[in-house]
Image: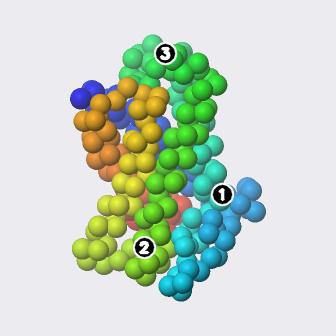
């Protein structure tokens, strides 16, 4: 397994991207993109495809902002050898900065696409957007809400970073925990409607 600081460096990039995307989603910029991705489509079961919380603004925002944060990490790594040694991403191999933007966007795309099945399932079992159920079902979805995007990111990470399967498992666990605590902080500053 890779050293913990190297894994946390990857997680920090995603936490920064996700948190800045939440700020972007709440800002008044590009308000036309605040429309639901499903266009209000109601399926045969009488329920929405994804719901109001999955917007084009959040979708594109995460893609762009993950690219920005990965490029920023690459720039910092190029200036500070200690940071470069900390990274499991060989930024020189990515022809920094050009491919760094591409892989960052791909990483962000994996993040948002991995969230959609969870939203689809929650609508089918009557969990409203931005809410959670109670009891065991609520706990399971609380865990999945944190893990889904991290799993998506870990699946594409081998395309541009040197990780092992054990690194991937640890990244999912640590990334899900980091996601949860970031959500608590965003809730505390009123950028999210519910904790976790």
Image position, residue 164 (x, y; %): 29, 31
Image position, residue 14 (x, y; %): 47, 42
Q: Write the residue at 64% across / 25% down.
A: 98
Image position, residue 34 (x, y; %): 68, 64
What residue occupies the far top of the structure in this picture?
A: 81
- Give the vertical position of 105 relative to 127 (above or below): above
Residue at the spot of label 2? 122
Mark 3 → mark 1, Cα distance in angstroms: 34 Å
Residue at the spot of label 1? 57
Mark 2 → mark 3, Cα distance in angstroms: 44 Å
Closer to viewer: mark 2 or mark 1: 2
Horizontal side of residue 68 vs 45, given as left or right:
right
Residue at the spot of label 3? 80
- Where disc 2 sits, the SS reads helix
* Mark closest to the chain's N terminus, 2 or 1: 1
CB atoms of marks 3 and 1 within 8 Å? no
| Quadrant of the frame with the N terminus | top left
Instruction: Kindly tell me whether residue 181 is visible in this rendering.
Output: no
Instruction: Kindly tell me whether residue 83 is visible in this rendering.
Output: yes
| Quadrant of the frame with the C terminus | bottom left
Q: Write the residue at 52% across / 53% down.
A: 112
- Where disc 1 sits, the SS reads helix
Task: Residue 75: name its quadrant.
Answer: top right
């Amino acid at each position: 397994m890779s050293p913990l600081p190297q894994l946390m460096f990857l997680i920090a990039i995603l936490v920064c991207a996700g948190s800045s995307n939440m700020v972007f989603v709440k800002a008044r910029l590009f308000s036309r993109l605040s429309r639901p991705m499903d266009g209000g489509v109601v399926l045969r079961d009488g329920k929405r495809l994804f719901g109001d919380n999955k917007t084009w603004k959040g979708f594109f925002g995460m893609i762009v902002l993950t690219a920005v944060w990965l490029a920023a990490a690459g720039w910092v790594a190029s200036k500070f050898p200690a940071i470069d040694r900390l990274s499991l991403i060989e930024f020189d191999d990515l022809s920094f900065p050009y491919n760094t933007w591409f892989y960052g966007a791909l990483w962000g795309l994996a993040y948002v696409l991995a969230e959609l099945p969870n939203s689809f399932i929650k609508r089918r079992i009557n969990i409203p957007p931005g809410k959670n159920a109670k009891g065991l079902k609520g706990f399971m979805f609380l865990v999945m809400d944190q893990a889904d995007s991290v799993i998506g990111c870990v699946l594409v990470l081998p395309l541009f970073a040197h990780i092992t399967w054990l690194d991937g498992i640890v990244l999912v666990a640590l990334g899900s925990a980091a996601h949860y605590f970031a959500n608590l902080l965003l809730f505390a500053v009123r950028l999210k409607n519910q904790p976790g």
